Amino acid sequence: MRRSRLTPLRAALLTAFYVGVWRALVSFLPGVPLVALAGWVIVYVVGLMWAIYLFDRATKRYEARVAVVDGYTRPQVPVSGETVGVRRGGWNPFDVTAAYYGPQPGLALFLFGGLLFAAALGTNYPNAPADIARVNKLIGPFMFPALVLATAGLATAAARSQRVRQSLSMVAVYSLLFGLLYVLMHLESRASGEQEYDLPPGGGNDSPQAMSVKVQKVIRKKFVINPYSNVSFAAPPPIDSIDVKLNEETANRYQVGMGDGGLGQGDGDGGGFGSGKDGGKIRFIRLRHSDKSWDKNFGIGGDKNLLTELVVRFPKMNGKVAEETESMDVATLGTFKQKASPPLVYIGGAGTFAPSAADKRVLKAYITERHGMILGDTLGNGGFHGNFIAAMNEITGTTAVTIPRDDLIHRRPFDIPQLPIVVAHGGTSPLGWKIDGRWAVYYHPGALSDAWRDDRAGIKKAIADQCYLLGINIIYYAHREHNEWRRSQQP
């Protein structure tokens, strides 16, 4: 039997086919981790090998069973895996001469898949008009499945051997069935991927709150010494006159804005927001991206301290602030319901920031259609500073401006007279992008989250405290703006 060679055309078709399968899985279920997707690819390849083996055995058995043998002629000998001159047409998939193994069905499949792929690719850019963007929402997820169909169709139409056409068709059908099974098994996780961010209920405010002081009577203790005792007491210590000194680490942390009140906006009781729901909490979400420093200062010993500080300064927010910080990729951010998206997401990095076209579309929809806010933070001297500014200029459709010192975001609930800087990687002035009169992006150029670490990155406590206050101000600003927007969306 003659073996078919792996020509450059066949190699290119195989590459496009498997790239399409992989990207189809990623695009249909963006929230699934890449490790899980890699496991599914292994299952796919192993299953494909078994499918080829079993299909080939079944085809040979079918050909042996229907082979024509009479007394005057010799049995027909398969040439290159095909039996010549007897069967034509039919619908049995194990028959290499079946009608749907011809070049015409493959060409039709190639045209259909190619047109669908080209249409989806043509709408795949971030600043698409509204009409094109709506079309892209419909056909965008099918871009790479269409590439799989087009590649399989082209390979089937170009093949010269019926056996090759049969094999390619089998691989295409197996891939489609596998993809369908994959999606069906993840329907629940995909549905649950449409997440909700619920604000905590209540009616707090951002005004300074008085701290209650209770007067408590102090009873002095006196010690009586028996002068005839066998125990000698020499110069008893003056217990009542001990001077208790507190250093700055153990001093009272109360500042303006603390007290028994709660942070928020609304008419309810305690801290929270008027559009909040029971069980809702203020969360701190960090976006994962291509820079390896995206997770610097993440979690315990890092930005989790910011949430702890929020509860310390506003005790009535206890139970209304998340216990842990979170991270997610940009695609997962797009799975939140439109009227229940996170009010604020954090993006930090040191080396670079290079969102894809799809990521830019999600971020643009997040800040424009879902009234979200982005907190950017440069954590190193790499290219993150310039990349982030350029990306936000493109996503917002406007340019960055310096946020004034007397802006509301710097005054409520805490008055911050000057921008606290840990390391001035990108200057000493905060930058912002405004959309419809609100700050949609706040960019800190001096490693804001470094101050939230347990070791404060070696800076003075006074500066670290100001960084905490700025973080709370930004969190409050984003949640207050989002609360007002949610209430305006209610019928």
Image (tube, helix red, strand yellow):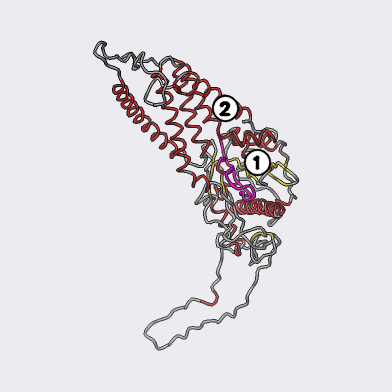
- The residue at which mark 2 appears reads as 117
Please say if 23 is above or below 102.
Answer: below
Question: Horizontal and vertical percent for residue 21?
Answer: 47, 30
Q: Secondary structure at mark 2?
A: helix
Q: Residue at x 53, y 29 (%)?
A: 146
* Left or right for 312, reference 182: right
Q: Is residue 347 magenta?
A: yes
Q: Residue furthest bottom?
A: 228
Question: Horizontal and vertical percent for residue 310?
Answer: 60, 57
Is residue 415 in sight in this rendering?
no
Please say if 21 is above or below 185.
Answer: above
* Left or right for 395, reference 12: right
The amino acid type, in three-letter code, at marker 1 is Ala
Q: Residue at x 38, y 35 (%)?
A: 43
Q: From the viewer's perspective, is the residue at label 2 or at label 1 nearer?
A: 2
Estimate the spatial distance between the alpha carbons at disc 2 and disc 1, rounded to whole Å.
23 Å
Considering the image in quadrants, where does the N terminus appear? top left
Of 248 and 329, nearer the camera is: 329
Write the start and end of the magenta stretch as one range: 330-351
Residue 365 is labelled as 1
Please say if 100 is above or below 35.
Answer: above
Is residue 482 in sight in this rendering?
yes
Q: Is residue 4 magenta?
A: no
Question: Horizontal and vertical percent for residue 452?
Answer: 56, 50
